[in-house]
Image (cartoon, rainbow, N blue to C red):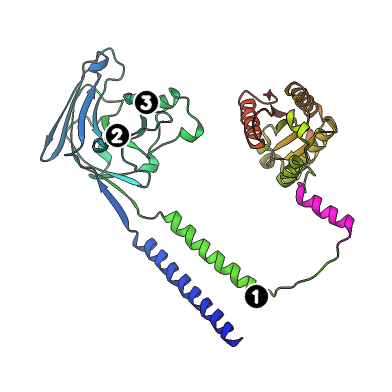
């Protein structure tokens, strides 16, 4: 027995020492601030220039590789174009793998450094673009489809070299307006940079624009600061939990639960304590109890309280909670006895309609919307809801719910108090 205790104490000692050593290592990494660097090989890169002559403009761009770097000249000439332009394009695609649209993943870098000597008196400003290729929104052979991660600066007010944070880059409004992207693809993307572009800003005046690109370098962390801090917090949280468990003595108490109380406890684990609607555990059990005949014509209705996120800041938690409770009551009183309502998240509810065709489910959804719109709510707040209906076909429950959820976003995007199917 004593040997087992000693072994346990030894393990605890080793765990404590390991925790301290790992913590010291993480703190050292944070303190030393070790960076990783990547230098763009300008001599090996494919360099080209583009100017507005391609669209019948009159500007002329040239580039020459020298021992000092890339000497770029741009003669801006006014023409029928409202915004004359010329660009220095440094292609980064990996030609050795015969994959012309495989660029560099810069998503783990934080800054880009530019060693650029400017030799133009008007100081029109410079725009740096990191153009990204992604099969979700890019087409091979079309430069415009490359996402333009852009940043502009006035060289008269910055040092040389200048370090630009990738977090400060943004997508130009014209590019976003010309592409119909999801929220996932709408922001900056540095995962597959196909080219680095240096060009005057759109406010450039007529005249000669000259610069020499001597060096381009990227800088980032081997391990991000956020990751290190998260690991440190996680380790000490685990250690604290272990200590608390050791300090609190374990008690095994056998309690005889009457049958009625047992049923109440089971209901509590399957329902939302605020609204009384089923939670996801209860919803799962509801689906499990459906007969095969019910699944043949099963429909679901998503119900979303419109602008619910405004209730908490404008009216407080008590009013918002009362609205949630009344919402479930209104749905229960309006839907059929065979239907079951479950709370999906903070403002979304799912109504399960067994043996119900799509047209019937749409009628139920419209009745609920009308009931919600006509009801009297706390503080005389006007409440409406959006709904989405889907009927099961040759698919599983997850696919059915996913399809209904997508329809709900369709209903919300077309305006409040709408039904989509």
Dot 2 and dot 3 residues touching (CB under 8 Å): no
Asked whether 362 falls inside the magenta stretch, the response is: no
Q: Where is residue 327 in the image (x, y as percent from the top left)?
A: 78, 36
> In front: 135, or 132?
135
Q: What stretch is highlighted in magenta?
A: 257-271
Q: Choose between 355 and 200: the one closer to the eye.
A: 355
Q: Is mark 2 on a helix, strand or loop?
A: loop
Position of residue 384 measured from the top left corner of the image (x, y, whole percent): 73, 29
Q: Which image quarter holds the C terminus? A: top right
- The percent coordinates of residue 190 (x first, y second) are 37, 39
Residue at the spot of label 2 = 99
Residue on which the image places disc 3: 139
Badge 2 density bin: few <14, some 14–19, many ≥20, Cα 10 Å: few
- 371 vs 195, nearest the viewer: 195
Q: Name the residue under label 1.
A: 247
Q: Which residue is drawn at 40% across and 43% down?
A: 167
Q: Where is residue 342 in the image (x, y as percent from the top left)?
A: 75, 40
Measured Cα–Cα span from mark 1 to mark 3: 62 Å
Whole-number angstrom distance, CA of label 2 to CA of label 3:
14 Å
């Amino acid at each position: 027995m004593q040997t087992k205790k000693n072994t346990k104490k030894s393990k605890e000692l080793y765990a404590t020492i390991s925790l301290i050593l790992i913590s010291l290592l993480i703190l050292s990494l944070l303190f030393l601030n070790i960076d990783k660097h990547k230098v763009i090989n300008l001599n090996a890169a494919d360099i080209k220039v583009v100017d507005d002559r391609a669209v019948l403009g009159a500007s002329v761009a040239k580039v020459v590789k020298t021992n000092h770097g890339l000497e770029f000249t741009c003669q801006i000439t006014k023409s029928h174009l409202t915004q004359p332009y010329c660009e220095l394009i440094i292609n980064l695609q990996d030609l050795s793998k015969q994959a012309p649209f495989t660029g560099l993943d810069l998503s783990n870098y934080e800054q880009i450094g530019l060693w650029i000597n400017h030799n133009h008196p008007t100081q029109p400003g410079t725009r740096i673009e990191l153009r990204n290729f992604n099969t979700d929104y890019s087409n091979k052979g079309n430069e415009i489809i490359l996402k333009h991660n852009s940043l502009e600066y006035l060289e008269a007010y910055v040092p040389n070299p200048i370090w630009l944070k990738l977090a400060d880059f943004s997508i130009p409004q014209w590019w976003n307006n010309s592409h119909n992207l999801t929220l996932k693809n709408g922001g900056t993307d540095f995962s597959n940079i196909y080219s680095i572009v240096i060009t005057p800003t759109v406010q450039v005046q007529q005249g000669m624009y000259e610069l020499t690109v001597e060096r381009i370098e990227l800088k980032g962390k081997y391990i991000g600061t956020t990751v290190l801090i998260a690991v440190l917090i996680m380790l000490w949280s685990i250690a604290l939990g272990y200590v608390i468990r050791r300090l609190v003595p374990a008690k095994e108490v056998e309690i005889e639960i009457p049958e009625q109380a047992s049923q109440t406890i089971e209901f509590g684990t399957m329902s939302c304590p605020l609204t009384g609607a089923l939670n996801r555990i209860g919803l799962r059990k509801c689906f499990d109890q459906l007969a095969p005949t019910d699944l043949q014509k099963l429909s679901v209705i998503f119900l979303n309280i419109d602008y619910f996120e405004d209730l908490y800041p404008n009216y407080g938690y008590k009013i918002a909670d009362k609205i949630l409770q009344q919402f479930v009551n209104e749905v229960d009183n309006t839907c059929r006895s065979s239907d079951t309502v479950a709370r999906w998240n903070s403002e979304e509810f799912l109504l399960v309609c067994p043996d119900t065709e799509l047209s019937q489910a749409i009628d139920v959804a419209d009745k609920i919307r009308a009931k919600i719109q006509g009801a009297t709510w706390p503080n005389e707040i006007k409440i409406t809801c959006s709904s989405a209906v889907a009927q099961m076909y040759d698919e599983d429950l997850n696919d059915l719910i996913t399809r209904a959820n997508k329809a709900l976003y369709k209903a919300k995007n077309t305006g409040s108090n709408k039904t989509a199917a």
